[in-house]
Amino acid sequence: MSFATPTTLSREQVSDFEREVNAICDDIMNNLGQADVDHIRNMIRISRASEIGGRALLHFGMGPLSWIAGVLALANAKILDNMEIGHNVMHGQYDWTGDPALNSQTFEWDIACDGEQWRHSHNVTHHTYTNILGKDRDLGYSLLRMTDEQKWKPRHWFQPLANLMLAMGFQYGVGSHDLEIGRYTHGAMPKAEFKARLDRFLTKVGKVWFKDYLLFPALALWSAPRVLAGNFCANLIRNLWTYLIIFCGHFTEGVAIYREEDTRNETRGDWYIRQLSGSSNLTGGRLFHIMSGHLSHQIEHHLFPDMPAHRYPEVAPQIQALCRKYGLFYNTGSLFKQYWTVMKRIMTHTLPPKRATV
C-alpha cells in the first residue's frame, strides 16, 4: 500500500469513465423490485430461524455434537445479521421499499457497535474519505500500521498480537471507531462530547452482553455454562469472519493510499477511481458472497454503496470490462491469496523503516 500515482487518464477519459459507471448504476437502480425485497426478507427469515435453532440446540441439546451444531447455527445467524442484513440495510440499500423494518436510519443490529455511531463512522467518514491518510480511520483501524506513510512507533513491534486481538474482538473495534479517542486525547474533542459517545457505545455493549452472557444463560438454568460458552464461541466465529472479509477488501497488495491534497477538486469520476483503486474483491460462489454480505465485491460496494448488495455479482463483470477498457487495475483473488498479502503487509510494517544510507 503506497501513495496512489496520478491517473494516466485524460480529464475527458475520466469523465467518460464516470458516465459509463453512472449508466451501470442507473440500469440497476431504476429496475429494483420485488425480487430485491424477497432477497433481503429471505435473509432475515433464514437468520432468525438459524438463531432459534442454534439457541434451542445450546439450551436443550445433549452432548458435544449438538453443542457444536448450536454454535455453528448461532454463528451463522450472527454473520447474516451483521453482514448481509445489518450492514446493507444500514447503508440505505432498501430505503426505497418504504418498509420500516428496512429503514437505514432506525435499523439496529446484534453487535456491540451502535447503529447510529456506525452510520457516521462508516457511511459518512469511511465511504467519503476512502483510503485518505489522516481522514479514513478504517485505515488500520487506528491501531495497525499498514503503510510506510504511517509513522512507526515502538508499539508497532506488537502489531501481530494487536491484529490477532482486533480479529477476535472485531465487533468492539468497529464499535469503538466513532469514539475518535485520538481526537479526544489530543484535545480536539470536548470532554462532554466524548463522554456522550462513550456512554452510547457502552450502553450498546451492555445490551449485547446482557442478552448473550446473562439472560440466555440464566434461562438455561443448569445448562448455563454450556449456553454461555456457546454464545461466546458464536460471537468469536462471527468476529473472526467479519474481520477476515473486511481486511481482505481493504488492505491487500495493490490497494492505493491517498493524500488529502490528492483529492482536492475531485470529480465524481475521480471519486470512482479512488474507490476502485482503494478496494479489493474476493472470488467465490453464491453462498460465499452471501456470507460475506457481498463484501467479497468490495469494489462494487465502494462504487455503489446504496445499491442492494446481492446485485453486485451482476454488475461486477461490467466494471471489470470498463477497467480493461480504461487500463485500470481491478484487484481480485481468492480468500487465501488476498489474506496472504494482508498478513505480509501487517508483518512488513511491524518493523521500523530502514534508514537511508549515505
Image (cartoon, rainbow, N blue to C red):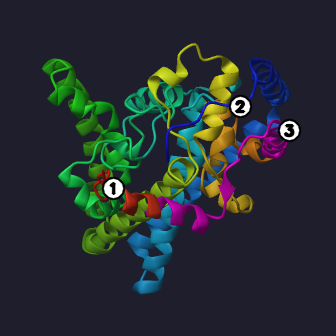
In the foreground, 159 or 212: 159
Query: What amino acid type is highlighted by mark number 3?
Result: Lys
1 or 2: tag closer to the N-terminus: 2
Query: What amino acid type is highlighted by mark number 2?
Result: Thr
- Residue range corresponding to the magenta coloring: 314-343
Residue 3 drawn at (x, y percent): 50, 38
The nearer-to-camera label among 3 and 2 is 2
Q: CA distance from mark 3 to mark 1?
A: 39 Å
3 or 1: tag closer to the N-terminus: 1
Q: Tell me what residue is drawn at x 46 percent, y 29 percent.
A: 259
Residue 107 drawn at (x, y percent): 50, 32
- Tell whether 321 sits left or right of 334: right
Q: Tell me what residue is drawn at x 83 percent, y 26 percent.
A: 20
Residue on which disc 3 sits: 325
Per the picture, the main secondary structure of the magenta-coloured stretch is: helix
SS at circle 2:
loop
* Mark 1 crowd level (few <14, some 14–19, many ≥20, 10 Å Cα): many
Q: Is residue 334 magenta?
A: yes
Query: What amino acid type is highlighted by mark number 1?
Result: Leu
In the foreground, 331 or 116: 331
The nearer-to-camera label among 1 and 2 is 2
